[in-house]
Image (tube, coloured by chain):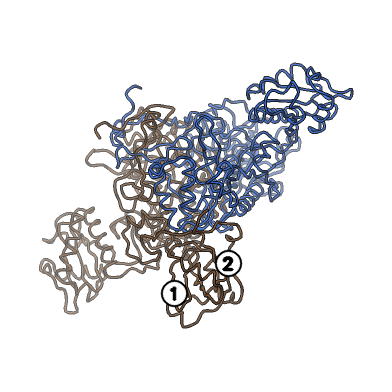
Chain colours: A brown, B blue
Amino acid sequence: MSQETQEATSSCLKRTHYCGDLRLTDAGTTAQINGWVKRRRDHGGVIFVDLRDRTGITQVVFDPQIDEKAHALADAVRSEYVLNVSGTVRERDPGELLFQAGEIELAVDSLNILNTAKTPPFPVEDDIEVAEDIRMRYRFIDLRRPEMQKTLAMRHKAALAARNYMNEQGFLEIETPILMNSTPEGARDVLVPSRHYPGRFYALPQSPQQFKQILMMSGVDKYFQIARCFRDEDTRSDRQLEFTQLDIEMSFAGVDDVLEVTEGLMKRIFEEAGDIPVQTPFLRLPYHESMARFGNDKPDTRFGMELTDLSDVMADCDFQVCGQVKAIAAPGGANFSRKDIDDLTQFVATYRAKGLAWVKVTTEGFASGIVKFFTTEQLETAQERTGAKPGDIMFFVADKPKVVADALGNLRLHLGKKLNLIDETQYNFLWIVDYPLFEWNEDENRYEPFHHLFTGGTEETLPLLDTDPGKVQSQHYDLVCNGYEICSGSVRIHQWDIQQKVFEVLGITPEEVESRFGYFIDALAYGTPPHAGVAPGLDRIVMLMRNEENIREVIAFPKSQQGLCPLTHAPSVVTDTQLEELSIRVDAEL
Amino acid sequence: MSQETQEATSSCLKRTHYCGDLRLTDAGTTAQINGWVKRRRDHGGVIFVDLRDRTGITQVVFDPQIDEKAHALADAVRSEYVLNVSGTVRERDPGELLFQAGEIELAVDSLNILNTAKTPPFPVEDDIEVAEDIRMRYRFIDLRRPEMQKTLAMRHKAALAARNYMNEQGFLEIETPILMNSTPEGARDVLVPSRHYPGRFYALPQSPQQFKQILMMSGVDKYFQIARCFRDEDTRSDRQLEFTQLDIEMSFAGVDDVLEVTEGLMKRIFEEAGDIPVQTPFLRLPYHESMARFGNDKPDTRFGMELTDLSDVMADCDFQVCGQVKAIAAPGGANFSRKDIDDLTQFVATYRAKGLAWVKVTTEGFASGIVKFFTTEQLETAQERTGAKPGDIMFFVADKPKVVADALGNLRLHLGKKLNLIDETQYNFLWIVDYPLFEWNEDENRYEPFHHLFTGGTEETLPLLDTDPGKVQSQHYDLVCNGYEICSGSVRIHQWDIQQKVFEVLGITPEEVESRFGYFIDALAYGTPPHAGVAPGLDRIVMLMRNEENIREVIAFPKSQQGLCPLTHAPSVVTDTQLEELSIRVDAEL
C-alpha cells in the first residue's frame, strides 16, 4: 500500500521501554523502542540515530555488521521520521559521551519505518530561536520539545494532585454548564446564539460563580471543579480567551476554613507536581498594610526594599507637593549613573509620578541635587526608616497616595529584578485580607463593590451597612505568590435581607435586581447555608512552577492575544446556512 | 442586622460530625451538626426535627427540660431552615424507630438558626411525584434529595477513578480548546461569534477529535481528557446540547491496546464508583454477527431470544415476500391473546415491517393462522433453530434484511422487557468489531465513511482501497453495555498517502480537503505515529450505574430538550451593544 513506510501491525508497535527508561543496568538485554528521529549521522559506515520520545533520547546504532537490512533501511531515515527499532542494549564508548549524553545505546537488529516526515520548519530542540507565531502554527512540532513535554506533564500532575487532594478533603467535583446565561457585568461575555430560541444567546461562564453558590443551596456542602472559564477582554499578555480555574466552594465555612483548604491544596500541588516545598500556614497581610508597604495588593515578598512613609517628617519641606511622601532604598544604588537615574525617572513617569527624587548614601554623607531641600535630620530619618546603608540610594516620590503607591511599588519591582535581589527558587505565598466591601466612585458619586456583589462583610462591621457602608470590611481574600495573584475568594452573603441591603447601598433597584439576578436572588430565600469559596488559577500556578511569564507556554493550544488559533486558524468564516439556522446575520457594513 | 437569623460566626459553623456519621457508638458524647430541616413536629411539648445534610438524617430533639432557649427558638423553625445544633448523642426510644430510621438522636442544648427558608415548592424527598419542569426550575431544592446527592457523588467518583486509572496507565490529561474551528460535517456545530474578527466564528468541539490526533503528532504518546463536547442536534431524549466524554488517544497502539485500556477503565469506574463487579476481557462480536443475531450493533445480551435466519427453509413458500425470513421465539408467549399479538404487529409496523407472522408451539403441535402455508418440516426447523418450547410463540418477519433486523431486533427488546427476561443487576459489556470502512450510499451512488474520515483499515484489507473499497474492513470498535453504546473508537489513519486514497474513494477533491481539513492533513505529513483512540461517554456510564434512562438525571444542571436552562432561563436576550461588538444582528424577520 504505502511504499515507503510499514503498516503498523501490533507486533511492531509494542515497546519494551520508553527511550528515557533505558539504563546501564539494561546492558546486554534486548529492547524495542519507538520514537522520532532527532538526528541521524553516518560515521565510518555506521549510522547513528538519536531517537526521541516523550521521556528522553536513546542513541540507536545501525551497524551493517549487526544487521545489513536495518542498516540499509536506516540510510533513508531523516529528521522526525517515526521509527520502531529493536536490538541489544549496550554500554556506549566513553569517547562518544563527549558529544551526546547517555550511558547506553541500542545496537539495532530490526527497523520498521512507521512514518516519514517532511523537513520540520524548526528543529525539535529546546533553546531555539524561533518566532512564536511559527512555533504556534506548527504546534505539533513545537510540543515535541522536551521543555514543552515537561510543562504538559506538570500541568497534568498539578490537576491530578488537586483533584485527589480535594477528594480527600470531602469535596465533590461537579460539572457546571458551559452554556449559561449572560450577566452584563464583570468582563465581557462570550456569547453563543441559540438555534431553538432565535434572538436569544447563551454566555460562556466567566466563572461558575452563580452555579457554585447554587450548589451550596443544593446541599452539596463541598464543591470543586477544574473549570474552563471565558473572558472576552481586550489584549493583555497574560490573559487568554479561555482559561482554567480550580473552582472551590464550601458550606458552613468561614474565612479560616477556606484558607486552610487552599493552603493544603497549594502545598499538595507545588510539592507533588512541581517538587517545590511549601510551608503552611501562609502569612496574612491586611490589604491596607500591603498597599502601604508594597504599593499594591499582590506584593512580591522575596525581597525587601519596602515603601517607607516619610510624610510626617517631610510634610512641611519645599519638596512636598501633595499629601504623601514615600521612599525606598535600593541596595548598591549609590553607583547608579545619571543615565540610570534618568531612566528610572522615566519609568516612574509611566505611573504618573511627576518626579523621582533621589539621595545617595555614601560613607561621606548624603549626595544629591535635592539634599539642600532637606535638613540632615530629615535625611537621617529617611535613612533610618528605609534602612539605607552607605552605597545605597534612596528614591522619593511625593504625590497623591495612589500615584505614590503605583510609582514606588513598580519601581521596587523593577529594581528588584535589575539588582538581582530576587531568589528565583523561592515561593512566597501570602494572603491579602481585610479588604473593604465597597469603594467610593468619585466620578459617579456612588459606592461600587470592591470585589463583587455577593461578597459578605464581617460580623463586626456589617451593622455599618446602614450607617457608613465605606467602613464595612469584607470577608474577601486574595492569595498572592511572588507578585502574582493566584486566587481570589470570599465568604458570600447567604442571607436574602443582607443581600438586599447591599443592592440598596449600591443603588441597584429591585427591577434591576430582578432582571439581572432574578433566579439567583430568589434561590437565596429557600434555605441557603453560610458558604465561602475561592478559585485558584491553574494556568498561573503552572506558570509559577515552570517559572514562565507567558501564559501561552503553559497551554497546549493557546490563542493569540486577539483570539486567533495559529494552528487551526479559528475563528473562521461559516456558511450562510449555519447563520440562517441561528437567525443571525453578520453586520452588513463589514 | 438580620433579625431572624444568626450571623455565621466561625464557632457556630464548625461541625463535629455529618448527620450520616453519627452512630450508636457515639451515644453519650457531644456533637455539633449542621443541616436542613426535613421535618419538624411537636410531640408532648418536645420538638423533634429531622435534620438533613448530604450524608443522611439525624433526629434532633428540643426538650425544654434540657435547654429552654433552644426549645423556644426551635418553635419558629420550618422546613428547609438551615440549622446549627449541638448537644448530646443518645440512643433513641426503640418505640420511635417505627416511624423513623436511625438508632440515635441528638438532645440539643444549643441552636443557631443560620437561615430561614420560604416554603419549598415540593418536599425534599425521594419518590415524589413532581413534574420535571418544576424540579428543574427549583433544581437547588431538587438536588437536596438523597437520590440526587447519590448521583452527584457517584459521578464525582467515576471521574476521579477514571483519572487515577488513566494516570497509572501513563496517560496525561491535556486540556484542548473549547473555542475551536468549525468543520461543516458530523452534527451541527455550536457557533461563537468572534469580536476581534468580525464575521468569523469559533465552534465548540463536537469532540476533541482533531486535537487528540494532533497531540499524538506532538509526541504526547498517551492523552486523555474528561472533555466537554457540544452538539446542536434536534431533539432526542438522551442527548444534551453539552455532554461529557472520557477522551482517550494513544500512539504506537493497535486495536488490542485500546480495548485493553478501555476494559481496565470500565472495570475501575464501575467497581470503584458503582460497586459493580466487571469481568474482563470483554467479548468481541463482529458487526455482521451482531446484526444477524440481534438486529443491531448495540445488542442487549442480558437475555436470549436471538434472531434466527430461516430464509433457506422458507425461501420457496408463499409466505416469503422478499429476500429474508427471520424469527424469534418468545418464552411463554403461547398464551398471548389476539390483542397482544395485534399490539405487537402494530409495534413492528413502526419499523416498517409489513406484517408479523406467528406460530404458537403447544404440546399438541403448532397453532396459527399461517400454519397451512408451511410444511411441518419447515415449522420443526424453525422450532429447532429458535429453540422454542411448548408454551412459546415464534414470530416471523419477512422483508428486506434492514427491515427484518429493525423490526425483529426491536421486537426482541420490547418482549425482553415485557416478559421480564432482563436481569437488571447484570452488566453485559461487549465489543462490536470488524465494521466495514465504507458504506455504499444507494441514493447518491457513492461511498460514505461508515464512521468517520480518519478511521484506519486493517492491514489485510487495505490493498482493496484501490480495487474494491466496500470490502475494506475498518479498525473501528464500539463498546456496548446492556443495549447502549458506551463508546466508539478506532485505529486512525496515520499515513498521509493512505488518507489521500480514502479521500479519493469518497470523492473528496483536493480543494475540498484543503478547505475542510487543511492544517490537519498538512500536519499528518510531519512524522505522525500510528495511533488509536476511543471516547466513552461519562453521562451514559453514570446512567448505566444508576439505572437511569433519562440523561438529565445524571447532570447537575441539565437543559431541556430545546436547550433551555429551566433554572437560569438561559438563553436570554442580550443588549444591542453586545451584538454590535460582535458585528452581528439578529435576523430582522423575527
Query: In this rendering, which labeled residue sits more in front, label 1 or label 2?
Result: 1
For label 1, the SS is strand
Tell me which residue sits at (47%, 44%) in the image.
B503
Is A456 positioned to the left or the right of A220 in the image? left
Q: Is residue B495 left or right of residue B270?
A: left
Q: Amino acid at mark 1?
A: Asp
Which residue is label 1 attached to?
A42
**Residue B236 percent coordinates (x, y):** 54, 30
Q: In the rendered view, does A291 fall on the left or right side of A210?
A: left
Is residue B514 among the parts visible in the rendering?
Answer: yes
Q: From the top left corner, tell me how far across and down residue B176 is, in percent.
A: 45, 49
Front residue of A425/B97: it is A425
**Chain ID for label 1?**
A
Q: Are there few (<14), some (14-19), or many (20+) residues within 10 Å of tag 2?
A: many
> What number is the disc on residue A26?
none
Q: Are marks 1 and 2 in contact (CB under 8 Å)?
A: no
Residue pictured at 29% horizontal, 36% vertical: B581
Q: Amino acid at mark 2?
A: Gln
Cα gap from disc 1 to disc 2, whole angstroms: 22 Å
Quarter that holds the C terminus of chain A: top left
Disc 2 target residue:
A32
